Amino acid sequence: MNIAMISYWSCPLTKLGVATAGGMNVYVLNLAQALGELGHTVDIYTRVHLEGDDLQPTLHPNVSVVHLRSEHHDLYQDIEDFSDQMEEQVRRRQVHYDSVHAHYFYSGLVGLKMRERMEAPLFATFHTLGIMKKYYVGTVDHRRIKSESDIINGVDGIIASTELEKTDLIAWHHVPEGKIYTIHPGVDHHLFRPYDRHTARSILGLTEEKNIILFVGRIDPVKGIHLLIDAFAQLQAAASPELQATKLLLIGGDPANQEFWSAGEARQLRQQIHAAQLEDRVIFVGSQPHAQLAYYYAAADLVVMPSAYETFGFVALEAMACGACVLASRVGGLQYLIQDRINGRLFEPRNVDELASIMGELLVDGDQKDRLGQNAAASSYRFCWRKQAEKMLTVYQKFI
Ligand code: UDP
């Protein structure tokens, strides 16, 4: 099959964990590569993210990225222009697509335009929904919510990452059930696999540390990092020297860049750390590539994901695949990945006391931590990009 993916919001080759680049980039890249491995051709249409970049790099013999220029500051206006450029590229490449798959609502809007210009079925994965952000984070964007309704009405199929996302789509947007296909994303098991903790720590130069708690993700309010810092401060105030000898590493963002610190979230977190006098205990490590992250997950005693909401939660799955003990808030996809006390621990969202108490419990109970980590690694095998790609193909093929 020839498949076009639209990734307007963010190029899948962008540095992960910085600004808005995160799970969606990982999803698009891995799905495209898995489809390519299965012998299908995938072109990913996205915006130029770095001046001087190769405009049409090939990621795999069957997978290309097509960078298009974005000239408008108003993204809604830019969508028309992007669609024109995409149409021009499709004509030049003389390719007929059997399927068009749009990621996130901006791409969905491009997809709707392209649907009028190319004869191909259109699929959407939302990754996050405006209505869920309104509900869980309090960010209200009516134009986005309306756009998502238009996309829902205009596409042939919607791909949900979990049953919960499907339920939410039905409950909040009244999507007919038959229009939604639930297909779990995967994890790269070649990269994310259990490594020996001591080896991982010596590779990372972390041999001095007693306990390590790890956060990985975009430095964004939705991730709930402030809750983790509050809980960590409680742990530090505890009497036990065992618990006090703990460092919290925050991976994500670009701390070497002044702009990072002028953005709201990083600035507030830094003030919070300063007020709690935790500067020598809470470290902003900055974003790390996947190859390096695998060692961090293995080196950590606990990986904490205190998000207000997660549609899926790649970080939790990657950490589990590395045999880490994951502690996450009971929201969205995280409740699918983690079964409480079986392959990780869940806590009630925003409950700092509970988070601190479970962190304390796990840090002194090595057996529980190891058992949860081993079970996590075993359960991560349910999530595989190849299987996801095969399921995606059966959906695409239904509409040919
Ligand atoms: N990530 C990374 N380096 C970083 C921070 C994050 O590679 O410094 C990756 C992380 O490994 C995961 C993705 O970004 O694959 C984040 O996905 P997740 O679903 O956890 O969060 P989202 O960004 O979708 O909110």
Image (tube, rainbow, N blue to C red):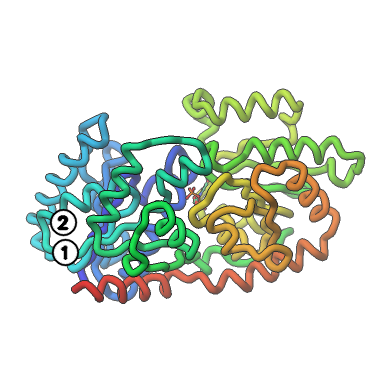
| Residue 271 at least partly seen | yes
Image location (x, y in percent) of residue 339: 66, 65
Residue 196 position (above or below residue 131)? below
Image location (x, y in percent) of residue 175: 35, 59
Front residue of 207/145: it is 145
Counting residues from the N terminus, which is met first, the one under dot 2 or under dot 1? 2
- Mark 1 crowd level (few <14, some 14–19, many ≥20, 10 Å Cα): many
Amino acid type of the residue that numbered disc 1 sits on in the rendered structure: Ala
In the picture, measured across the screen, residue 374 lies left or right of residue 240, that is left
Q: Which residue is mark 1?
A: 120
Q: Which residue is mark 2?
A: 115
Residue 96 position (above or below residue 382)? above
Q: Secondary structure at mark 1?
A: loop
* Residue at image point 28% right, 75% down: 39
| Residue 202 at least partly seen | no
Name which quarter of the figure residue 395 lies in.
bottom left
